[in-house]
Image (cartoon, helix red, strand yellow):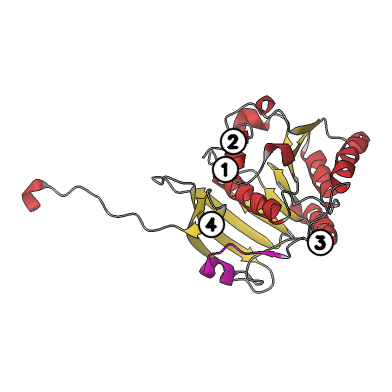
Amino acid sequence: MNIIDCPIQTMSQIFVIEDCKKTDISILKTRTRAIEAGPAATRPQILSFGIAPLDAALPDGGLGAGLLHEVSGAAGDAAARGFVAALAGRFAGARGEAPVLWCRLRGAGQEDGALYGPGLVRFGLRPDRLLLVLAERPAELLWAMEEGLRCRHLAAVIGEGVASGLSASRRLQLAAGTSGVAAFLLPPPGGRASASAAATRWHVVAMPGRAVPCWRVELRRARGGGRPGDWIVEWEDAAFRFRLAAPLADRSLVPAASR
């Protein structure tokens, strides 16, 4: 269930690009050229959640590729990360296991936990199809995201731990719209929401007491006529799909004298 708390070195087939700077563009381009050399799959335009009320709340009946989506969470809660991993895994699966680029700040694993290979597999993200960028500063992370979004053969690009602001988010949206790659931004938890060009904005928190990953998913904004709302959503990892969670039964204890 977890996607953290495991040193990244145990993911032997993951590509790691450290010290992400503009002088390192050749490294990232070398990786993306190798990906582009493979056969390209047909990219889905809309990814349905398979949950009628949630899909109906989105203007296109699902989550659009080629758009920037912002997903916030609570401090100390990996729910937003798990939710994004599941979405990215579904985009990857729809494209024949196309790679996913995940951008993080160096040292983020010490505070938030490192990405955990078996946990990512549960969400449909194979470690050997994951490109990891470790950047020194937020500006470098956003630059790496923008460069990655120009590669049409990626399934998704994820940026974790930075707030983009209006100008940077517009650049990310433009790059995503040009390539058709889905973009996800996970801002630092607990921060104030900044102006953003993101097509959708979500807030996700974990729901305890469930045997499977379960989240309270709140759609706060969707451009183009979406309807904000919130849902309790579970992840069915055997089928790699979402479903509405059944309400928990009230099992509170009744005093013997009242029976």
Residue 165 seen in render? yes
- Residue 251 drawn in magenta: no
Picture coordinates of residue 111, whole percent (x, y): 61, 31
In this figure, what is the number of numbered marks? 4
Q: Does 52 appear in magenta? A: yes
| Residue at screen point 87% across, 41% down | 34
What element does badge 1 sit on?
helix
**Labelled pair 2, 4 in contact (Cβ < 8 Å):** no
Per the image, the residue denoted by label 4 is 242
Position of residue 160 measured from the top left corner of the image (x, y, whole percent): 69, 43
Left or right of 160, for residue 202: left
Residue under pointer 1: 122
Quarter of the image where one finds residue 5: top right
Looking at marks 2 and 4 on the same chain, the residue that comes earlier in the sequence is marked by 2
- The answer to which image quadrant residue 40 occupies is bottom right
Residue, disc 2: 118
- The amino acid sitting under disc 3 is Gly
**Residues marked 4 and 1 touching at CB (< 8 Å):** no
Q: Which mark is residue 177?
A: 3
* Residue pictured at 65% horizontal, 74% vertical: 225
Left or right: where does residue 250 sit relative to residue 80?
Answer: left
Q: Nearer the viewer, mark 1 or mark 3?
A: 1
Q: Residues within 10 Å of mark 3 (few under 14, many from 20)?
A: some
The residues bearing labels 2 and 4 have C-alpha atoms spaced at a distance of 19 Å
Mark 4, Cα crowd under 10 Å, few <14 / some 14-19 / many 20+, is many
Which element carries disc 4, helix, strand or loop?
strand
Disc 4/disc 1 C-alpha distance (Å): 13 Å
